[in-house]
Amino acid sequence: MGEDKAACTQDLQDIAVSKQTQDEDEHAHPPPPPASPPPHAEPGVARTKQAKKRLQDAMASGDLAELKAAIAAAKTVGVSLEHRERALEVQEKLLEAQADIPGSIPSPSYGSLIDASRPTPIGVQICQACEKIYDLLHEPERSNGDDELEDLCRTARLETASPDLKSSIFGLMRPEEIKSFLQAPDHQFWQHIKQNTEEFIQLLDDPGAAVPYSVDEMTPEAKNARVRSVRPVVMDQSVREPATNTPFGHTGYQKFLTLQIVKRMGFKDIAISGQYYGASYTPETQVLEWMQVRGEPMDGMIVMFAPGKGDREAGIKAIKDFGIPNAFLDLTMKASVRFKQSDFVSSVLETVDILDEIFAGMGFEPNPWRTEEKVNCDPGKGEISLNLVDLMEFLDVKPDGSMDDKKKSQAEDAFRTWKKSDAFRRRVVGILTEEGRGVANYKDYGALSRWLRGHFPRDEEYRILVHAHGGDGNTQDAASVEAVLEGANGVWAAVIPQAAQSGHNSSMVFLDNMVQMGNGHVLEDFWLHQGAQCARHIYYLNFNSYTIPDDCPIWGARVDQLLHTAFSTVSGEEWRQRRGKYYDIWGGDARAQMDRMTKATELQHEVAMCRSLSRGGNYRISPLVSDVETWRKRIVELGAAVVGPRGRAGDHVKEVRDLGFALMNAGIRANMNEQATLKQLWNIATRNKTENIRCDQVAGYLKAQQHQGEKE
């Protein structure tokens, strides 16, 4: 009996997903040569029919050895995966019954590509497997990418498979569907962008040219003491904010590459992850895994989350799991039935107390405050920033700067209560604010900054940062400067302006404005001399395109193409003339290499053609942040082209969104605002529902919802 058990255990290991073992197993009993087909039948068709019948007979007989041989024969002649999957499921049950032991196999190895026993997180391994399969599909002489893909999909459907593998694209899609996404023009183009970005990051370490001017030579004289003395602070949002605007969403590795760029620009405080999805696995967590895998330090990193009970758990878990040293608390003050926090005053104090204890356990100083001299030089450790998301709306700020007296009193009471807490006074070093729909003007930010500074003065060790969304007035970048002139320290913003509905304030534009107003600290504290190309590459990463916007200040496509000599800022008229292009300094070889990166190709033309088809409509999907209702309305406006002539958008819209997250989690780039992509996802969701294949539901993006509180 012991020998039988051992043999059965070996059989179980034969179907564990090690590809090498599986291949040996499937070829252990070579099938007999198929009988000659009748003269009138095509040989291939006859062999396929014969192999299918052999599979059916073997499944019915319960003969394990014959079933193994039939599966091997079916694979050889190209019987469909669907037929072989059923046979493999029967084989697994036979093995389990014969062995009389539980079906689960510890630490399974899913082919040579994914192994749950390895320390690398499964989410990252899934991305790496997709990369490997992509390479094999494009280099078939090395190995058969189709076989690797087929094996992973089959094993992801086994009961013994890891839940993470089951909920990945390998468990939710068929091999031919995954192959279609991998070989689509957009994903192929992403491979070019990824490789070029990795080369660009190396160029940033050695740009091949010295900056010809001193900081004093590049900074105009200024008599305004406030402008000269303030040390502009930037909490960088480039890893996160552009996700709110791109139809491709984000992937963990794409975020990781963005991080490498902004770190080389000298930013020390970087928002790395937004934990707004509850317990759902998203690229916001995967980027942390990539950092772990690559040995990237968490110095200066910030995790963003809401402080309410039920909302804060994911952020706190990320801090504990990955050692993130700083927290950003997103607080909504207006009453809302959509959020779990009912008392915004107590929820802040509770979360600050929890974080104070965690940060103390991580060995951080009780008082993490950084002086003016250190704030842009040393990364933060153990800091908490409190973002008053809807403060303008809560106070009902009027165009003249006046506020609702009752609401103003309530806010001031909250401030006093918070500041009675020892942990709050020590840990909370940043008071932040924003207005998310772009309806505030730049003067609103100045008035609010002045009012906040009155309650959170400098000598009590508080920094004030603002974030301004674009609107019809297009004053978001003016808001950054106005806030600083009225007492703020700087901004929390991304390098590029593309975000949310109509954009947001750009940190690059803010810093340049401060330079031109005579602030000498900017060029001392930040390395902006390759900033124009950094902005471009961040755009490439986010929008999967080398076609950059024309009119973006500093780095836009037309900005440096002189239309008339009278418009030159580096020659001719001497008033505020610049000595040169301060933010685009490269050696000749480096510039030539970058030009080669973006040279037009046939693939680029194909991508542009695809992109042109997705323009128009009243809705656009930005998959990492768009709510289910936006997905629904986009599908509805595309109509039968997505759901068919008798389709209902509500039948599968949630599953379509969840499949979009599965693609992002696998590192695959797809334009999810595009009709063709939505049609593909719709078809997969429809089939999965009939086959009872469940996709993990991804929680809604809390951060965006915070800009639409319920009326009180």
Image (spheres, rainbow, N blue to C red):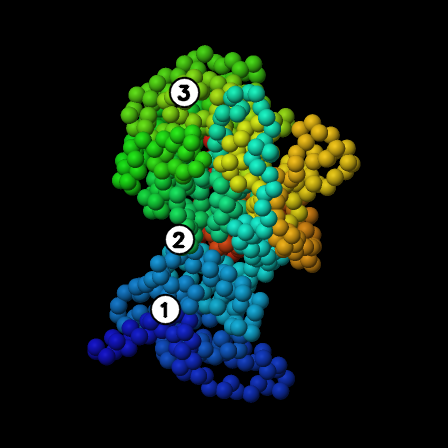
| Label 1 crowd (10 A; few <14 / some 14-19 / many >=20) | many
Q: Secondary structure at mark 2?
A: loop
Q: Nearer the viewer, mark 3 or mark 1?
A: 3
Q: Is 201 left or right of 372, judged from the image as shown? A: right
The kind of residue on which mark 1 rests is Ala
| Label 3 crowd (10 A; few <14 / some 14-19 / many >=20) | few
Label drawn at residue 30: none
Percent across and percent down for residue 705 are 48, 33
Could you say which quadrant of the image residue 310 lies in? top left
Dot 3 or dot 1: first in sequence order is 1
Percent across and percent down for residue 485 are 53, 22
Q: Are marks 3 and 1 in contact (CB under 8 Å)?
A: no
Residue at which label 1 appears: 16
The kind of residue on which mark 3 rests is Pro
The C terminus lies in which quarter of the figure?
Answer: top left
Q: CA distance from mark 3 to mark 1?
A: 63 Å
Q: Are marks 3 and 2 in contact (CB under 8 Å)?
A: no
Residue at which label 2 appears: 295
Q: CA distance from mark 3 to mark 2?
A: 39 Å
Residue at which label 3 appears: 457
Q: Residue at 40% of width from left, 81% of height from top?
A: 28
